Image (tube, helix red, strand yellow):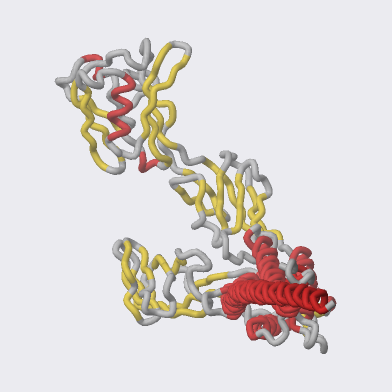
Amino acid sequence: MGVGSGIDTATLVEQLAAASKKPKEDLIAKREEANSAKISALGNISSAIDSFASALSSLISGGSLFTQATSSDTGVVAASALAGSRIGNLSVQMEVRQLAAAQSIASGSYAGATSPIGQGQMTLTTAKGSFAITVDAANDSLAGLARAINAAGAGVTASVIQDTTGSRLVIKGATGAAQAFSLSVDPSADAGLQAFAFDPASYDAGNPSGMSLAQAAQDAIVRVDGVEVTRTSNSFSDLVPGVKIDLRKAAAGTVITIGSSRPTAAISQAVSDFVAAYNELKSMLDAATAAGAGALRGDVGLREMQRQLAKLPTTVLSSAGGPATLAEIGVRTQRDGTLAVDGARLASILASDPDGVEALFNPGQTASSPLIRIVSPYGAVKPGTYTVSDLVAGDPASGKIEGFLGVVSGSQLSSSIAAKSKGLVIEPLGNLAEGTITVDLGLGGALQAIRDALRASGGPLATTQARLATESKTIAKDREKMETRESAYHDQLVRQFTAMDSRVAAFKATQSYLDQQIKMWTSGNN
């Protein structure tokens, strides 16, 4: 281009095309920048509320805001609060007189694990029943007998161990006196196999024959506030309400105190941290939605988030009978919407009703009667108070939950999926005409509920995220269309200026011809 006309049409075309494209490109870039700012602001807010909810949840799940069970001697007894339990003031005197143990027996020494032991039929009798054990040519060895015992599924474990004298078969059962087991051998079996017979009832440690008793099966024996009780395991949670007990050593005559430690300082700090985090999140929301300058001004999802957060100080978090809301313990809303802590009020409530304040932060589920054991974990059931009736303990159990017949599973009852108590599982420990189960959110649960509602499919945050994602796609398509149109315009300019250049070149050729003819005419006349 430009050869015929002598004009730099190539540069002219580029300048005209650029002048056409720039305002459109600037407009799209401005839209991209604005949408990116919205996406970034929304991401920051989403992360902030995640952190807000998760930080408190971590404190709760870690037990920092729960009253903890304590032991005056953890070398003898360890105690810990069960998740979701509210143990309050606790003082239990405990004496560990005997640990629960599993029966363990050992054979005489053999040269090796593959040494033959004799063939024949045996019967292993455990708490689960009687199990036939066959030793034949295929498994005539210590290792073969161990495999046969383990394959029987009798509730005991057999293994071959090596000691300084050779190989021995060791059989171990489960803890508890009722888990004792015996091993009898058919009289027709080989003499070598007869050495594996064992009966704990007739065992004579002074004159053992065949298998020897390394440990007898026994229950744990504990005196609790002067009352002797037994348990089949050294770990149990049905003796002190809301507390898991782990017996570590027998210490007859030594009284251990199981008490409680209140997290007063941790709760006070948690209130201050919550208020600071709330105000920081509110500041972020205010900046994002500020009229004129806010990247997400007018966004419906963020307005809903602000509304939900503003309700937190007056949201009922506990039905434990003490303070039910944050406002009642001194967390107040100021004129600008931020929160502040009335330290004197908080200290007073913590001193007069520490259980009530603790309940505000921690999720809890409680039954109105000790005859009801709640099996379902916290979080499986929506907060609320649920009625149970006509409970009958046993296997199978029976009863109603929220007016619907419970779904029976052995000694447990599950709520019907049609009931609002869906997810609730209980175990009746006795017959009961009527009772209630209360499930509380706690502040951590309330924050999680707000976050989940905002993030739910069709929820405010999800809707805004989807809208911004759609806008990103629309902008990308608009840019693609603009590029296509401007490319076509550029090509059109090239065609137009090429045609013009050709016409100018033709005009110049005609002009040159005419100039030549005129010169010839002029010369001829002279």
Instruction: State left or right for residue 129 relative to residue 54.
Output: left
Residue toward you, 393 or 399: 399
198 in relation to 385, above or below: above
Instruction: State left or right for residue 449 relative to residue 516.
Output: left
Give coordinates of residue 378: x percent, y percent.
Answer: 53, 66
Give coordinates of residue 357: x percent, y percent.
Answer: 70, 73
Image quadrant where residue 112 sits? top left
**Quarter occupied by the N terminus:** bottom right
Q: Residue at x 50, y 75 (%)?
A: 382
Residue toward you, 97 or 102: 102
Give coordinates of residue 473: x percent, y percent.
Answer: 59, 73
Instruction: State left or right for residue 432 relative to residue 277.
Output: left
Residue toward you, 167 or 493: 493
Q: Residue at x 64, y 86 (%)?
A: 300
Instruction: State left or right for residue 466 relative to residue 159.
Output: right
Q: Would residue 465 be visible to someone looking at this image?
A: no
Q: Residue at x 74, y 77 (%)?
A: 514
Number of callouts in the render?
A: 0
Image quadrant where residue 172 sits? top left
